[in-house]
Amino acid sequence: MKILLASSDSIALAVMDKLMELGVLGAVLTNPDAPQLRSKTPVPTPIKQRALEKGIPCYQFESLRTEAREAIAKSGCDFLLSFSFGKIFGPRFLALFSHTMNIHPSLLPIARGATPLQAAILSASRSWGISFQQIALGMDEGVLFGQVELSLDGTETVQSLEERVGLLAASSLQAALDNCLALRATEQKGQASYTSLIKSDSFPLDFSMPASLVHATIRAAIPWPKAFTLYEGGRLMVTSVYGGFDQIEEGPVSEAPGQVVAFDKSRGLKVACKDGYIWIDGLQLPTKKAMSARDFANGNPSIKNTRLGG
């Protein structure tokens, strides 16, 4: 068995290392080099960088049509493993392999689609999971070769959850590969749900929502695109929230939603929500750098008595 790992994201690096440890990684398929953030210089994906370091053959194509299929057919890989790749596999491409498997960061059929990590945080749930599934023509509809659960404590951001999911996927990979090769699979059960694409304005804060959901919205937008609210007539981005589920102060609220009711040097701004209070400890004005709530309040003392979003 020689596996072609298709990925364009650092979430798959631990899985890539595991495949090399098992001696089954034949090549990687990743997106073409592209500019990142403000850099105009094309940058290789984390997967390509690791492949170059380890001497692993690396394929990059704008599309998976004839040129890509012909090259991959000569690679000697008979197993396709996908993990956050970013392109759709057509039937002709899938036909190149005797086995296929995709790693998806949710307990399918929950949160099918491209943004399951954000969905995990936005759910404000205390549990989530990973699915190993056969690649199907429909979005995340394939049969399952295994699922693994993980707990959430409310401190997760997309960045930190990505690291945890990557490590858990790597440690659970061998059992899923064994099931795939033996064709031991189960159908997805339950009502399917789908994630939404993330845009730069996808995370406006609504403090009239439950405190746990406001807390989750902030975390789901870290590191990008950042949640935002209004302050003195302009946009204010919220870049960090203090603590996890245990730091949300639930209980009766007498203040208007979004009202800053207290300031603490270590926890930041205490803000009223529908059914409790959260502590915001990171803020950023447009064109400015992100800073702690303490530093922001030093330069903008009116923040301590304002009503955010109003």
Image (cartoon, helix red, strand yellow):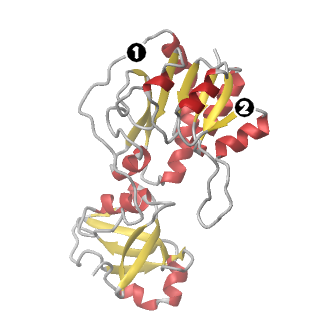
* Quarter assignment of residue 4: top right
Determine the residue located farthest toward the top in the rendered image.
182
Q: Nearer the viewer, residue 16 or 48?
A: 48
Q: CA distance from mark 2 to mark 1?
A: 30 Å
- Choose mark 2 or mark 1, whichever is in front: 2
Q: Quadrant of the C terminus?
A: bottom left
Give the residue type that dot 1 points to: Ala
* Residue 304 in the image: above or below residue 274: below
Q: Nearer the viewer, residue 87 or 67?
A: 67
Q: Position of residue 228 (x, y in %)?
A: 39, 71
Determine the residue located farthest toward the front in the rendered image.
66
Please, what secondary structure does the residue beneath circle 2 have?
Answer: loop
Give the residue type that dot 2 points to: Pro
Q: Position of residue 101 (x, y in %)?
A: 49, 24
Q: How many labels were placed on the picture?
A: 2
Q: Position of residue 280 (x, y in %)?
A: 43, 71
Provide the residue designation for mark 2.
57
What residue appears at the point 34 percent right and 40 percent down from the top-left corner?
111
Which of disc 1 and disc 2 is earlier in sequence? 2
Question: Answer yes or no: do the residues labelled 2 and 1 have beta carbons within 8 Å?
Answer: no
* Quarter assignment of residue 34: bottom right
What residue appears at the point 65 percent right and 41 percent down from the top-left corner?
47
* Residue 268 in the image: above or below residue 231: above
Q: Quadrant of the N terminus?
A: top right
Label 1: how many Cα within 10 Å (few below 14, some 14–19, many 20+): some
Provide the residue designation for mark 1.
185
Q: Position of residue 16 (x, y in %)?
A: 65, 33
* Residue 86 in the image: above or below residue 199: above
